[in-house]
Amino acid sequence: MKELSDLSLSDEVLYSDDHEWAKAEGDIVRIGVSDYAQDQLGDIVFVEVPEVGATFQKGDVFGTLESVKAVAEMLIPLGGEVVAVNTELEGAPALVNQDPYGKGWIIEVKPADPSELSRLMKKGAYLEMLKGLGQ
C-alpha cells in the first residue's frame, strides 16, 4: 500500500468521509473513488454500477467494487439521479486503479440538492482525515 505522500489527491474534486470523490461539471456531478480507496482495495476486478435513472439519497450504497482482496460498497456523496455510468469499467475495471480521477470515474448524477457538495472536503481536509486514520 502507498504511503500518504505517494497518494494522488486531486485539487479538482471534493471528497467524502467514505473515500468517494465528486466533481461538479455544470449541473451534473461526476463521482468516483479516491486513490486512497482504490489503493486499499488492491487490484479491482469488477465494478457494479446502478442503472441510469436510479435515484439515491446521500449516503446510500450505489454500487460495489470487487478486488482480489475484498468487496467494498460505494456510498454516494450526494443525493440525486444517475444520468450516466462509466461503461468502460465493464471490460476494464482496472481503470479505477490506474486513473481514479479520470478514466476510472464511476457514475454521473444530477443532484437533487447541489448544496450537498458544500459538505464535502477539499484535498487538504481529506488528507488531514487520512492522517487521522493512522496511514
Image (tube, helix red, strand yellow):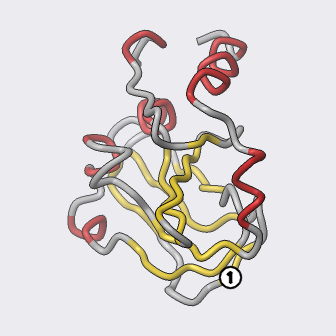
**Residue 104 higher or lower than 30, as above or below:** above
Tell me the residue at 51%/85% (across/down). Answer: 51
Residue found 49% across the figure and 39% down from its top? 34
Compare residues 33 and 79 and report the one nearer the observer.
79
User: Which quadrant of the view contains residue 88?
Assistant: bottom left
- Compared across the picture, whether 90 is left or right of 124 comes to left
* Tally of numbered tags: 1
Q: Which residue is mark 1?
A: 55
Q: Residue 54: where, in percent of width, then height? A: 62, 85
Q: Is residue 107 above or below residue 105?
A: below
Disc 1 residue type (three-letter): Thr
Q: Position of residue 117 (x, y in %)?
A: 70, 53
Q: Position of residue 97 (x, y in %)?
A: 32, 41
**Which element type, helix, strand or loop, lies under badge 1?**
strand
Residue 30, compared with residue 87, is above or below; it is above
Q: Looking at the image, which residue is at 48% across and 53% down?
A: 32
| Above or below for 49 versus 47 | below
Residue 127 left/right relative to 107: right
